Amino acid sequence: MSRGILVVGAGPVGLCMAAALRRYGVPVRIIDKAAQPSGQSRALFLWTRTLELLDRDGVGGELLASGQKIEAVNVLAGPKRIGRIELSDIDSIHPYALMLPQAETERILTAHLSRLGGKVEFGTEITGFINGPDYVTATLRHADGREENVEAPYLIGCDGGGSFVRKSLGLSSSGPAQQSDWLLADVRVEGFSSPPTELNSFWHEDGFLGIFPLPSGYYRVIADLHDVQGARPEQPTLAQVQALVDARGPGGITVSDPVWLSAFRIHERNMSSYRAGRVFLAGDAAHLHNPVGAQGLNMGIHDAVNLSWKLALACRGVANTEVLLDSYNAERHAVADMVVSNLSRAAAVAMLKNPTIQFARNLLGNVLFGLEPARKAMAERVAEVSHSYRNSPINGTNDRGLPGPAPGERLPPRPDEPPLGAGDSPRFALFAAPSPAVWELQQEFAGLLEPRLRPAISPCTVWLGRPDGYVAAAAMDEDIRQIEDYLRIYVPDSAALAAM
């Protein structure tokens, strides 16, 4: 019987989860009922915040070498541009998005997992589990029909929109589950003059249309298919794709040579909880939303980063295990609620039908996109760097309103420093000037803190960064005891502190 954490689903979310856990020294098994990777392009975008988080695993170079940088997003109505978002405005070491087909992302993450000693068990399906007080007992069925019973301290469902793990838990949605049908096509495009470093989204009364460049020289065309009808949308034809591009695009575009045509139904929802005892949900198993903002894969990777360091500390026996693990749901559920709502509103705005309201929308859009603060805010939202955990139950104090990010907010990576959370242990980072009090803190909590002190964020302050790159706590130099009190919450006793 295995006792490693069991990860169900070997898409990008499951692969990130398994790799992070193994990197932190946590035994893990990752299974997938498919016989092999799908090889399909599927999700395409890795946004700025996702690239920052993946730097922790040391795969950033491979991703960049395989993908294509996206520097701007255009919003158009027919041939007329309503607005433009420059991703270079983002305060990041990655002020761009990366266009990379999901199959390539999976290939790179699978190779990374292999270097860490992990391996995906394809052709292995979970058929049931018991969510016990001390461990999860799961039944696995292998491709040859053999059944295996395993014990795991935790089980993580990363098994997509039709998640077996989620259905077995019987969790409800936290809001109204909406359905929408979509068309997707990877095709050659002629008569379209947009640079390959830019995305183009078209607002039309008939629906949304996106035309996105692929690294291969092809383009991804994506469009909604009006009202939901029938059990599932029919497989699209090239002629249907051409008709949608003619109706909603700028005109003069010809599509040809399809390498992938697909239609799918999205059940937009956010589950009521991402945790039930020792079982967790991540990615599409936990939340689904329309593909207008291309946020889905990225949101799932953020789930994996958030949960993996907490599970790694939980497996070491920290004192606040339950609060720490509950914070995964509190933090990620709130972000998903916001994203689901924002994307629903964005889709509604893109598909306004009344000509008068369309005119007003386009006029207002021109005004908003012309304002630098509004344009920057939109760029940060699209790139996901504005996501935060301001109401997290594991936030520490910041009672003096120090200049800089507050507890729960993102710590922008610095180009001359290693990413927070890198290495073989989920350690917090201290940002402070050297002092006897800081040195004592480093010695006392050597098992929880990075050995290297990072430069202060602002003068006469001490900041504590979480292993996932968000602020845990901040204090003035003379209030450094607040940082000590925060760290002590993780330590059950002095013996445990020495062993960590």
Image (spheres, rainbow, N blue to C red):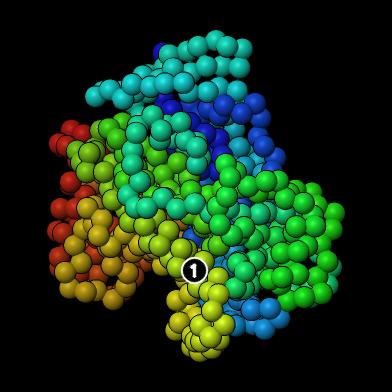
Element at badge 1? helix
Q: Residue furthest top?
A: 146
Image check: 408 left or right of 114? left
Q: Residue at x 26, y 43 (%)?
A: 326
User: In terms of image quadrants, where is residue 154?
Assistant: top left
Q: Residues within 10 Å of mark 1 (few under 14, many from 20)?
A: some
Q: Residue at x 21, y 74 (%)?
A: 401
Q: Is residue 227 above or below residue 380?
A: above
What residue is shown with label 1? Answer: 348
Q: Residue at x 41, y 44 (%)?
A: 286
- The C terminus is located in which quarter? top left
Q: Is residue 47 above or below residue 31?
A: below
Front residue (pair 489, 430):
489
Image check: 128 left or right of 320? right
- Image coordinates of residue 178 in percent, x first then y, are 45, 53
Front residue (pair 25, 259):
259
User: In terms of image quadrants, where is residue 491?
Assistant: top left
> Is there any visible trace of residue 296 in the rendered image?
no
- Image coordinates of residue 350 in percent, x first then y, are 55, 72
- Image coordinates of residue 168 in percent, x first then y, are 38, 29
- The N terminus is located in which quarter? top left
User: In terms of image quadrants, where is residue 399?
Assistant: bottom left
Q: Residue at x 67, y 54 (%)?
A: 184
Amino acid beneath label 1: Ala
Q: Residue furthest front?
A: 230
